[in-house]
Amino acid sequence: MSYSSGRGLRADALGTSDTVVMAVAGSAPAYSIAAGTAVLAGAVGLASPAALLYCAIPMAGIALAFSRLGRIDVNAGASYSWVGRTLHPFLGFLSGWALVVSATIFMVAGSLPAGSMTLALFDADLADDTALSTVVGAAWFLVMLGVVLGGARLTVRAQLLMTGVESAILVLFALLAFLHQDTARSFDPSWLAPGHFDGVSGFASGALVAAFFYWGWDVTGNLSEETRDSRRTCGLAGLIGLGAVFVLFEVFTVAANVILTSDQVQHSGAGVLAVLGEEIWPGWGGRLLTVAVMLSTIATLETTLVQVTRSLFAMGRDRTMPAALGRVHARWNTPWVACAVVGTVALALFVASNALGTVGDILGDAISAMGLQIAVYYGLAGLAAVVAYRRTLLSSPAAFLLGGVWPLSGSLFMFWVFAESLGELSPSAVAIGLGGLAAGVVPMLWFWRRGSEYYRPARLDASRTVEARSVPGLSPAARSASYEGLPTDF
């Protein structure tokens, strides 16, 4: 795999705490709960906590896969590079493309609630105005695009503020929910059991939405070229971030089951957290949780921009997409062409989204479509980790379980959810999800025919430990190109 020899991303800009914050912000706990709870309840009813629990187990296997792959290949493209260098370059490109498409769809699915929640702070009736929500959401998007363009340090400083306030509000209301007395029903342990699912297909539909809840922690992989000691830090931060959001998701879905009626959950849509807040703390609760959702939505817009621009940067650098995408700003060390392209496409989608229906309608189909694409690139990454470490899996019980069984189980789970969900989703969700993936075949074949060296990769094999070359001025990506393996300790 080739890398450009020009200016690269800013190395060693982020530390461990920075990447943990980015992992939590990437999964956007408040936004995910607000946007996904009604969709998840519609799929599995009161079994929402169970869907999140049973999806978290294989998702942890994918996080382990990302951690292990990041030890042997530092690359802003993350799964795009790993899958291409272990399974097949075509699969690697489609893995990266799936992330790019899902992130692009999220520009609409995330920006609309950002605008809607901002308007709700001033007038609840304005929050349902799709056109006005689009304008305000687009404004927030442009602000975050400017922050991402300004560099990794500026990006993290903004996240520390937004995610810090969001997390403090969520923890406060988690405690208040535990103490709340006026409830719609009592806690039922069966909500965490598989008995509430409507068969296998019902569980698969719930798991697809649950995958959307968790999606985003893997932004740490895309930041690996800009992180100190990234071979250890990025994977660890992803695991910590996944664990933190899992706890918040479980607490709030249980609280919604206990405090709200089924009608309240279904009819409140993306405003479910505000409704829950009003029940817990009348007067102030709804406003505070609306602020949390707004901050979470804006924060995850930022992390999604990081993912998609770094992925496009890696593709441009490898000449699997137009080479201009691999250009880096001389002052900020950020992929400014990729930022400009993403901004232009997203703004066009904002305009088009006005013809698609209400905020709630757009969110429902977008979440399901993104779930399909997330399942694809997570599943491929899990399989790639097993292949990369195949020669070392029998070296110890830990290597076999944490490096083989768990990532492979996570991978198979993602592929199974993808296949089972196709028959359950709406035609528009399937068209968006599969159509977006199929569109990637065109640039893949075009640049393959043009002879990109990405399609002649140096294979990843963790059983071979070769010391990375330490050349002054050499970018982390270039050092990674010569790095064929690491010891398999955890």
Image (spheres, rainbow, N blue to C red):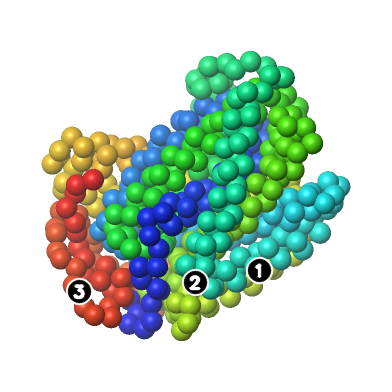
Distance from label 2 to label 1 (Cα)? 15 Å
User: Between disc 2 and disc 1, whose residue precedes?
Assistant: 1
Q: CA distance from mark 1 to mark 3?
A: 38 Å
Type of amino acid under label 2: Gly
Q: Residue at x 60, y 47 (%)?
A: 166
Q: Amino acid at mark 3?
A: Ser
Residue at image x 20%, y 41%?
A: 399
In contact (CB < 8 Å): disc 2 and disc 1: no
Circle 1 SS class:
helix
Res. 470 mark: 3
Q: Residues within 10 Å of mark 2 (few under 14, many from 20)?
A: many
Please report the residue visible at 29 percent of the width from the left and 61 percent of the height from the top: 229
Q: Is residue 241 above or below residue 56?
A: below
- Alpha-carbon distance for marks 2 and 3? 25 Å
On the rendered structure, is 28 left or right of 14?
right
Quarter occupied by the C terminus: top left
User: Is tag 1's residue or tag 3's residue first in the polypeptide sequence?
Assistant: 1
Q: Position of residue 56 (x, y in %)?
A: 45, 36
Q: Kindly tell me whether residue 269 is visible in this rendering.
A: no
Mark 2: secondary structure: loop
Q: Position of residue 293 (x, y in %)?
A: 66, 47
Decide: is 439 above or below 21: below
Residue 142 tag number: 1
Where, quadrant-wise, is the N terminus in this rendering?
Answer: bottom left
The label shown at residue 380 is none
Q: What amino acid does circle 1 point to?
A: Leu
What's the mark number on residue 151? 2
**Position of 3 compared to 101: left or right?**
left
